[in-house]
Amino acid sequence: MRRPARAFRRLYHLHPMRLGPLRMKPAAGQQLGLELTPPRALPVLDTLSRGATFRSLAVRRVLNPPESTGMGFWSLNPYVGCEFGCSYCYARKTHEWTVDRASAGDPSLQFSSGSRTAWQAFEQEILVKHTAPDVLLRTLDPAKLAGAELVIGTATDPYQPAERRFLLTRRLLEALLHHKGLAIGLITKSPLITRDLDVLVQLAARHEVSVNISLISMDAALLRRIEARSPAPHARIRALERLTRAGIRAGLLIAPILPGITDSWASLAALLEAARSARAAYVAGAPLRLGPASRAGFLPVLQQEFPDLVARYQRRYGGQVHAGRDYERALGRRLRTLKEAFGFPPSNAMGRPRPEAALPLAPEPPDAPSAPLPLLPPAVPVE
């Protein structure tokens, strides 16, 4: 039997094509008849009675180069979000950005914080980079650091309460033991860092290690109004002393210094006196910077706790990030005078010694201790 003429049809060869995620939306009043898989939420690792939830966040890289941060060092943050709840924190927006990036990479992924706002989620929905130690082991190339310092805890505290449960920071430090000759810095408000003294001592034998204990006031009652759940001042000073007695190079980081609140001679002198008693190697300080995230968190607290300063902050900062060159210079001179009085190096560099990072300060006049900072202009009566 013969085929009818023209009964054969040749199929054209189709080149392979990659299609992105398809989204199907039913027309009004119609049903697709398909069971669509709901978006996946970040896996929950733990939930605590105090309201904090810890969610797993897989990462492919953990090191942030100086080019991406605008800082002169590499940075690493094992957690996104922080329970300490510091009102002036500049890293709150990173929580939203991280979730947005994760969702962009996987459209089926969503972040559900229930009735919590994005602001509350930063303190209560902690993202845990559970693969960070393994990623660091695979990806760290000391040659790429080119002698620059690697600082852990530049955005969120690496020894916040989550660290007790997940040990990420400790495991990152252990991963760094596989290398030698690096400059490593840590920034923390937490005395929990003393748990890892054994690893820090080993690291200090292989690397140049500096620990910065962050503290802006010795007044515990004042701190509670500004930092909702941060460790007590004397607990941090005790941690600083334990570190220095163990041979770790450690110092006090006074940042941010809040104009009109924590920048007085008495307040700063109390901090330097405590640092000297703890045998701190250095003291560094910096004034408050009011970027968008800090402004949104700190100004409402200023309004509630220090209403008499609101108008003066508005005049001093306006829409700017900095308090003004005159204030920063005067504060620098005040810090230098106090450092000299308490026997600390004049450099304002934190961590590893960097003489070039010292502030170019003019000599303080003889009546400096009684000279007020050009802190905030007096309130102008509204006519």
Image (tube, rainbow, N blue to C red):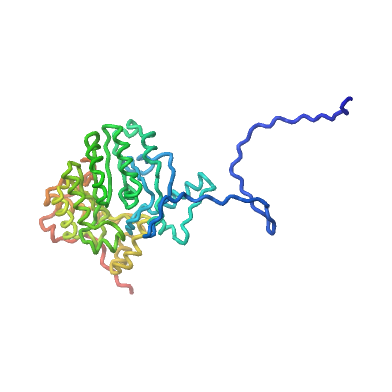
- Residue positioned 30% across, 63% down in the render: 313
234 on left or right of 93: left
In the image, 382 versus 30, the foreground residue is 30
**Height in image: 163 above or below 372?**
above
In the image, 82 versus 361, the foreground residue is 82
Query: Which residue reaches farthest top?
Result: 1
Position of the N terminus by quadrant: top right
On the image, the x and y values in percent for residue 132 come to 38, 41
**Height in image: 6 above or below 132?**
above
On the image, the x and y values in percent for residue 211 come to 24, 45
In the image, 166 versus 340, the foreground residue is 166
Q: Quadrant of residue 294?
A: bottom left
- Residue positioned 22% across, 35% down in the render: 205
Position of the C terminus by quadrant: bottom left
**Height in image: 6 above or below 233?**
above
Q: Quadrant of residue 331?
A: bottom left
Total marks drawn? Answer: 0
Query: Which residue reaches farthest bottom?
Result: 383
On the image, the x and y values in percent for residue 227 come to 30, 59
Q: Quadrant of residue 269?
A: bottom left
55 on left or right of 325: right
- Residue 239 visible at all: yes
- Residue 296 visible at all: no
247 on left or right of 113: left
